[in-house]
Amino acid sequence: MSQTATFAVTGMTCGHCVASVTEEVSEIAGVEHVDVSLETGALTVTSRQSLDEADVRAAVEEAGYQLA
């Protein structure tokens, strides 16, 4: 059964930012789908198991942004 979690990302200003966050978060084990909204800063992640927020935070930081 899939689980969905939503996070707020700060610092994104363009489509490249969205693509970077999407790419990094997609690499987390178990992640099935990533949706990033530039307008709201919302990061919605669907995964096969519950996500560790630290893993999401590390992926977002690797892309050059921060979780709010």
Image (cartoon, rainbow, N blue to C red):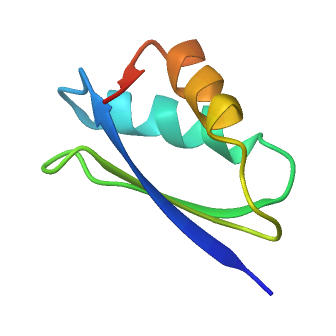
The quadrant where residue 45 appears: bottom right
Residue lying at the far left of the rendered structure: 39
How many numbered marks, from 0 up? 0
The answer to whether 9 appears left or right of 47 in the picture is: left
Q: Position of residue 15 (x, y in %)?
A: 28, 37
* Residue at the spot 82% in from the left edge and 71% down from the top edge: 48
**Residue 33 or residue 50, whichever sits in front:** 50
Q: Which residue is drawn at 39% across and 18% down?
A: 65
Q: In this view, does 22 lie to the left or right of 65?
A: right
Q: Where is residue 68 in the image (x, y as percent from the top left)?
A: 31, 30
Q: Quarter holding the N terminus?
A: bottom right
Q: Residue furthest right?
A: 29
Q: Is residue 37 positioned above or below 60 on the image?
A: below
- Locate residue 12, reporting x and y percent: 25, 27
Please name the residue shown 49% across and 29% down the image: 20
Q: Which residue lies furthest to the bottom in this view?
A: 1
Q: Image check: 39 left or right of 22?
A: left
User: Residue 27 at what x, y percent from top left?
Assistant: 76, 40
Q: Which of 53 and 15 is in front in this view?
A: 53
Query: Residue 10, relative to residue 39: is it above or below?
Result: above
Q: Nearer the viewer, residue 66 or 38?
A: 66
